[in-house]
Image: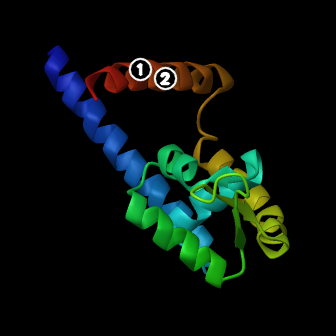
Amino acid sequence: MKRENKELGAFIGMMRGSSKLERIVKRDVSLYKLNITEFSVMELLFHQGRQTTQTIKDKILIASSSTTYVIDQLEKKECVTRITNPADKRITYVELSEKGRTLMEEIFPLHVNTISDCFSSLEEEELTQFVKTLAKINRKLDKRL
C-alpha cells in the first residue's frame, strides 16, 4: 500500500474514532444535563482549580463568545461561580461551586471508566505507543497552525 493511502487511512481512522469517542462522552454527560463543552470547562476547573475566562478559552479551544455563553449556562445551573479580581476588575476568575465540585466528584470516576473501557482492547505497550504517536502527530500539527 502506498504511503499516501496509509496516511489517508490513518486520517479517516482518527476522525472516525474521535467522532465516536465524542458521541460516547456526549451521551454520558447528557445524563447529568450537561453538554460536552460544559463538561470540558468543569473538568478543567475540577483538576486545575480557579481559572480566568481567557485561560478557559485557550485550554478548551472554543471561541471567546462561546466561552462566556458556556460559563453563563454553568452559572445558571449553579455549577460555577465568577470572581472579579479586586486588583484588576478586567480579570474574572471562574471556579467550581460546591454543587459543581460535588457533581464532578460523581461524574469524573464514571468518565474515567468509560474512557478506560474504550481503550481496553489495547495492550499496555500498544497504548503507550499510541499516546507517543498522537503526541508526535500533534507536535507536527501545532507547527502547521
Is the C terminus in the top left, top right, bottom left or bottom right quadrant? top left
Q: Nearer the viewer, residue 103 or 75?
A: 75
Image: 118 above or below 111: above
144 or 24: nearer the viewer: 144
Q: Of the residues tagged 1 and 2, which is closer to the observer?
A: 1
Q: Residue at x 71, y 74 (%)?
A: 79
Dots 1, 2 in contact, CB < 8 A: yes
Number of numbered discs overlaid on the protein picture: 2
Label 1, label 2: how many angstroms apart (C-alpha)? 6 Å
Which residue is at 49% across, 52% downward?
A: 57
Q: How is the image coloured?
A: rainbow
In this view, the residue farthest toward the bottom is 76
Q: Amino acid at mark 1?
A: Arg
Q: Within the image, what quadrant is residue 9 found in?
A: top left
Q: Is residue 73 above or below residue 3?
A: below
Q: Quadrant of residue 126?
A: top right
Q: Give the number of the disc on residue 135.
A: 2
Residue 26 seen in the current view: no
- Residue identified by numbered label 1: 139
Relative to 10, 59 lies left or right:
right
Q: Closest to the observer: 139 or 106? A: 139
The residue sitting at 32% across, 20% down in the picture is 143
- Where residue 6 appears, as percent x and y from the top left, is 23, 23
Secondary structure at badge 2 equals: helix
**Residue 42 image label:** none
In the rendered image, is residue 42 in sight? yes
Q: On the rendered structure, is 63 left or right of 28?
A: left
